[in-house]
Every structure is written in structure tokens, then in C-alpha cells.
Amino acid sequence: MTVNFPPGFLWGAATAAYQIEGAAREDGRTPSIWDTFSHTPGRTLGGDTGDIATDHYHRRAEDVRLMAGLGLGAYRFSVSWPRVQPGGRGHASQPGLDFYRALVDDLLDHGIRPVLTLYHWDLPQELETAGGWPERGTAHRFADYAHLVAEALGDRVELWTTLNEPWCSAFLGYGTGVHAPGRRDDLAALRAAHHLNLAHGLGAQALRAALPSTAQVSVTLNSAVVRARTDAPEDLDARRRVDALGTRIFTEPMLRGAYPEDLIADTAGITDWSFAHDGDADVIRHPLDSLGINYYTPTVVSAGTDNDRSRTDRLPWPDSGIVAFHQPPGKRTAMDWSVDPTGLHELLTRCAREFPGLPLVVTENGAAYDDKPDGSGAVHDPERIAYLHAHLDAVRRALADGADVRGYFLWSLLDNFEWAYGYSKRFGMVYVDYATQTRTPKSSAHWYAQVARTGQLPPY
Ligand code: IFM
């Protein structure tokens, strides 16, 4: 049966600056932590960097035409902080801002709504050298940056997002060190989480002050969908601990105004949280127009045994005790992530239940597969179509169950730099030949274009 999505539902695709732009040293852009990290031997697969990426900085117009050809109604992109405010402080770079003005104008000319994310992980290196997210000052620098971008683009962008997946910035960047800046320090990770929360609140205030009243402000979280392997109390407790560090550490202060008590208790061996000052909670809890949700795969946990202790000490869940993580059976993507659309339904309905009245947007969802052109140059990716169909059906079910979901953004428009995995993982609906930078829409792009144009999910 064909299913209709609500009128006005936003159909889009998403990208992030460092993953696609390239032009890392052009027009005054200074290095971000990802430039430093990816240029450090052993940090990314094959030593890949975002120096060139998909060369979107020079192919902007072509890429917007591609989106228009695919019938996208919206495009979610991020602004590179060191491109528009080199060094992370002080004056704006006019060439940097001009690039985003031109991008937004191209999008609007093609009837595509720009959805702007301020921070998708590319902290200016100078701010990391000054201490990075574990330091409070970084949150204030972020608010200055938010103000600067809002002043420059507020006349043409309506939909604004402060942060993308602060969990990754805090716990992969400062906890396990698999992301930039590559630090391994649980206290630093918790301090970073708090200062990212604060940056969100201060940034949202700065946006509201500079933007027209019609602008909408949001944040995007990759809340963990955590399942206990059994109903045994110790497994349920493992789930609670991972849920606190994966989800509630952000949702509770941002949307309710306080850190969860169990999180404070669980992390007491690391910190007394005195880096959270009086008054921070009021700043962090800023009324939002929507909540962005990124979902890929669920996490299955149980209480661990002593054997798991040594494995858990470099997992991104500081002081969560001994937790064992399990791979669910069934299909996997090229990231080795299990395919489980029920997790998306669970996440959307949970958010709808816990935060009634707050519209939701799926700001990322998608899958990497080992796509290759066939003899004729076409790229067929039936597994991705199956993945997208199943997850859109989960969105449809969440809508039917009362979740106020306003849009869906496929990750990603283009194959791109997948962080520590370099260019080895292809998430795009458009294939990129990195040697020639040729773009070839995969069969999933044609399929998704049809869904976006009609607002209908065909039978599968
Ligand atoms: O590529 C990333 C993106 O930058 C953030 N969300 C998850 C994607 C896939 O790993």
C-alpha cells in the first residue's frame, strides 16, 4: 500500500562542512581540530584527510543543481567555524561568509530550504589549543560565532541548529579519542559535555537576539536507543547507565533544565560536576522550535563481567560500570551497524512522549554500503533502498502513533569523508568518484527523489 506523508513534510538530505567542502586552506580558512587530527599519522584510515573531500567548495553550484534535480525540498548543511571566523575569535572572514551566502542563495533560487547547523565538529584548532570543549570559554566563543553567522545569514535562513551530535564531540573526541581532538580523559569528556550544553544555550540565545522572530532554533542529538539483552535487573541497570550518558546527559538539561540525578551519582568517581555553575541550567534550557534526531542503529547491553572491565575502560561511557555491549543478529551495514528500523520508531515515540508539544525532525538517517559502479557506470544500491524504505516506514508508524515528525533528512547527499574511516565508507545517495569528483546518483537517489517529489512511500 502507498503511504502519504503529511502535507508540508520536509524531505531533504544532509551533509557537514568538513566532510564535503575541501578547500581546507583557501580564502583565509584556518585549521580545525579535524585538520590537525586527520593530518596526524594513524588517526584516520589510510591517513585520509578532508583537504579536498568532495570539493564542494568549488562545486557548490553543481551540487545545488543536483539536489534540485532530485526534487529535494530542503538541504541540511553545516558552516565551517574556521572558514567564517578564522582562529575562532574576532572578526568574520568575508570570503567565508560569501561562500555560505552564495550557497543559500543558490538553494533558495532552486526552491530548496536551507537548514543550517552551526557546529558539526570542526572546532578551530586555536580554541582546542586554549583547552577546547572541556573549558568554559569555548562555550562563550561559540555564542560569539553564532551571533556572527546569524547576522550574516539571518535574512535568508529560517531553520537553525546549534550543535550536531554533541555526544560524539564530548565522548568520542575527549573520551575514547577516536575523533578529533583525540584526547582520552573521562573527566575532560564530561566537562566537554557540559560546555557543549552551555554552548547550545548561549548559542540559542545569540541566535534569538540576532534573528527575525520567524526563525526556528533547534539542536540535533544522536540519542542512544539502548536495549537491555534481558529483563534481569542488572541488565536493565546497565541500560539505565548507558541511557544516562548517551541520551539524558543532553536531553534533560536542554529540555527540562537539570542533569539527571542518576548520572551525577554514576559519575561521582570522576567528578562532582562543580564545573556546572549556578545559572547554567537556566541558560541551557532554552525553548526550542524543534528537536533534531539522528538515528542509525540501536545499542544492546547487559551487565558485564570482570572480563568486560578492561574492554570498557576505553568505551565512551565513563564510569558507567561494567557493561557488556552486544551485536544484535540480523543485517548489518558496511559500518557493521545492525539494521533495525524499530529503533527509530522507538526514539521518535519516546521523544514525543517525554517532550510533548516539541516537533521532531529526523535530521540524519541512512546507511553505508560498499557501492561500486557497474560496467555502464550506474550504481545500484538495493540494500540502501531497503534500509531507507524500512526507516521511512518507521517514521510513518511513529506519525500514526502521534509523534509530531516534521521532516526527514537522508544522510548523506554525497559519499564523503567519514571521519576516522576516511573515504572507505560510502553513505551517499550520490556516488562520488574521488579521482575525478564525478557525481553519479545511485538508484537510491532516484528512488528517494520519487518519494520526496510525491510525499508518498511506495509499497516495497
Ligand atoms: O557521517 C556521520 C555524520 O557526520 C554524523 N552522524 C553520523 C554520520 C555517519 O557516521
Image (tube, rainbow, N blue to C red):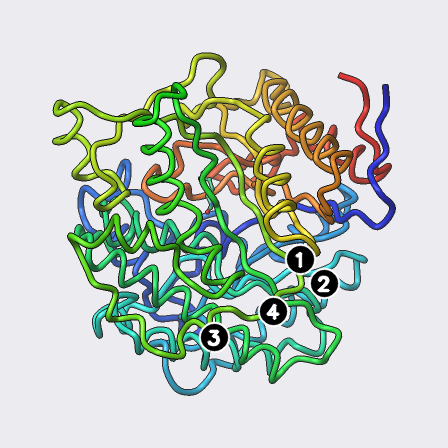
Q: Residue at x 48, y 61 (%)?
A: 163
Mark 3 lies on a secondary structure that is helix
Q: Secondary structure at mark 4?
A: loop
| Dot label at residue 61 | 1
Q: Depth-wise, is mark 3 or mark 1 nearer the camera?
A: 3
Q: Is mark 3 within 8 Å of ligand 1?
A: no
Question: Separation of disc 1 and disc 4 at Cα?
Answer: 35 Å
Residue 419, horizontal then vertical, whole percent:
37, 44
> Which-is-in-front pick, marks 2 and 3?
3
- Label tally: 4
Going from N to C along the chain, the mark reached first, 2 or 3, is 2
| SS label for mark 1 | helix
Give the side of residue 457 with respect to residue 331, left or right: right
Q: Which residue is mark 2?
A: 106
Q: Are marks 3 and 1 in contact (CB under 8 Å)?
A: no
Q: Tag 4: Cα neighbours inside 10 Å, few (<14), some, or many (≥20)?
A: some
Q: Which residue is mark 4?
A: 287
N-terminal label among 2 and 1:
1
In front of the other: 427 or 217: 217
348 over 229 or under it: above or below: below
Check if mark 2's residue and mark 1's residue have beta carbons within 8 Å.
yes
Residue under pointer 3? 282
